[in-house]
Image (tube, grey):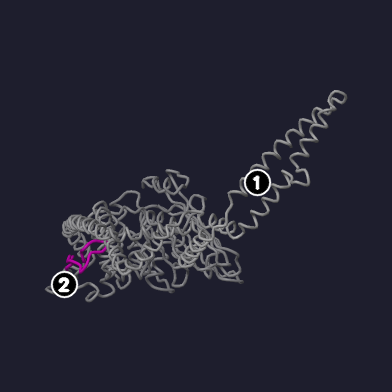
Amino acid sequence: MLRHLHISNYALIEELDLDLQDGFSVITGETGAGKSILLGAIALITGQRADSQSIKEGAAKCVVEAEFDISNHRLESFFEENGFDFDPESCTLRRELTAAGKSRAFINDSPATLAQMKELGANLIDIHSQHQNLLLSHESFQLNVLDTMANNATTLDAYREAYYLYKGTEKRLAEAIEVAERSKNEVDYLSYQLEQLQALDPHEDEEKDLEEENKRLEHAEEIKTSLYEAASLLDGGNDYDGLVDLSNRTRSIVENLTDVYPQAETLAERLESVYIELKDLSREISQQADDLEYDPQRLEEVKQRLDLLYTLEKKHGAADSTELVEVMHNIEKKLDLITNADEKIAQLERERDEARLLIQQRMTELTATRKKAIKDVESEVGNSLLSLGMPHAVFRVQLSAASTPTADGNDRVTFLFAANKNASPRAIADVASGGEISRVMLAVKAMTSRRAKLPTIIFDEIDTGVSGRIAEAMGYIMRNMVAEQGGRQVIAITHLPQIAACGQTHYCVYKEDSGLHTVSSIRRLSDEERIMEIAHMLSGNNVTAAAIDNARELLNGQ
């Protein structure tokens, strides 16, 4: 439950620290004193959208921080899954807004996302603002109420798992059919492309090898002449000695010096190596010159092969023959997929049919839990409406099949209502007045809160449209929500003295004028102050002795 609230520089609130109690608390104050501002600040720490204009004028940033007692609420899994420090007794939620429009969220002083703050906040506090009475006419809200009372979260999760499996299989099947239809038109073209590539049968790095061969064949005569010339220089001719003979003679001259010049031995050995290498080079060059022949037929074949490679590379956007090989393999795979498309579609159809059977089974189980809960819902809401001064009210829950299944099942829920004797119940949005809507909503909230076991519930003027004895009955229901579940905290923002008198703790929101600006504050009222506040609510600015006596009677009657 909410233990402490700190607000600084939010709207008209300059600095506020408020300790809150468990049980049933009421908050009162003049219209415009700042009750809605207080509620807006609390909404921030539940992850609601922030507005930088909410920052007090002239301030650089505003801060809202709330400390919650979580000792009995089994939230450890949330902290473990999200990596936050866990204190089994309490947790702190903080929200900071800057004038520049930046927003930061913290859980136990660790940075958090708004999604994380919203998830945790939903487990700690439920804020029922006045406009939420309109939710009573929404099918999704009505369905959620029925599911809360059915306590069917496990069944609903199992259904949703089957639903998303079915929808996913349907999507994959539709995509496979679309691809197959589109691909069938491509088969002839892809087959033609593959035939061209397979006929060419390109190889990795083939283009590079062919280009080198092409150059060699084009310059064969030039290469042959140069090689013979090099061989001649090495071997010598009729009129001159070649390098091989010269190196051998040089070696002999140096070798003859070894007896008188020992250093010559090393030189001779090196010259021996030169002689052997030159002799070997001479043989190899001569052999290559003899082997090299100008082959115009082979040259033409190479040129034609290169032309085909270049043409197909350009056609398929390939940089070289290696990429062209990859293109060929990709076309083969694509044709293989098209060829096997019917088999894949048949498999997906089987999976779709199996998923459909599963979703129908889970759908039936989910509907059964809802049907079972209807009687309890009708009984509990009906009893609450009786205590709220509607003895002839009829509340019914109508369950019908939806046109198509959704993630919430295949059920439509409609709350039917009749306020007067012998009147036929109709959709609540069509027949209920504002005051009747308020009473039905309070009855529904009181009922679902027992199942949801939320630690803190805040009602913002849920008493709209009611007064007198009915207001007092609403106050009793809110106070009983605390008694039915120990450790719960219910807070009501109200303008009605009958509800204010039911509170176990009473806070008053008020404005103060400092001379420079106006600020909103809140304080807990003493017993005497409560009497004066309720008397003020009864008689207005002119508090009479009768109003004070009436206020005492209201409080003593609790």
Asked if the residues shown at circle 1 and circle 2 are in contact, with their CB atoms under 8 angstroms apart, the answer is no
Image quadrant where residue 279 sits: top right
Give residue 291's position: percent from left, percent from top. Answer: 58, 49
Most distant residue in the right direction: 260
- Secondary structure found at label 2: loop
Image quadrant where residue 294 sits: bottom right
Give residue 66's position: percent from left, percent from top. Answer: 47, 55
Most distant residue in the top direction: 259
Reply yes or no: does residue 53 show up in magenta. no
Mark carried by residue 297: none
Looking at the picture, which amino acid does disc 1 mark? Ile
Q: Which residue is drawn at 21% across and 65% down?
A: 385
Image quadrant where residue 119 sits: bottom left
Label 1 sits on residue: 285
Crowd rating for badge 2 (residues with CA inside 10 Å; few <14, some 14–19, many 20+): some
Label 2 sits on residue: 425
Give residue 61's position: percent from left, percent from top. Answer: 57, 63
Which range is magenta?
394-412
Q: Residue at x 83, y 32 (%)?
A: 253
Most distant residue in the left direction: 422
Crowd rating for badge 1 (residues with CA inside 10 Å; few <14, some 14–19, many 20+): many
Reply yes or no: does residue 401 show up in magenta. yes
Most distant residue in the front direction: 238
Nearer to me, 40 or 526: 40
Q: Is the magenta stretch mostly helix, strand or loop?
A: strand
Query: Quadrant location of the C terminus?
Result: bottom left
Q: Residue at x 35, y 71 (%)?
A: 131
Asked if residue 271 can be seen in this view, the reply is yes
Looking at the picture, which amino acid does disc 2 mark? Pro
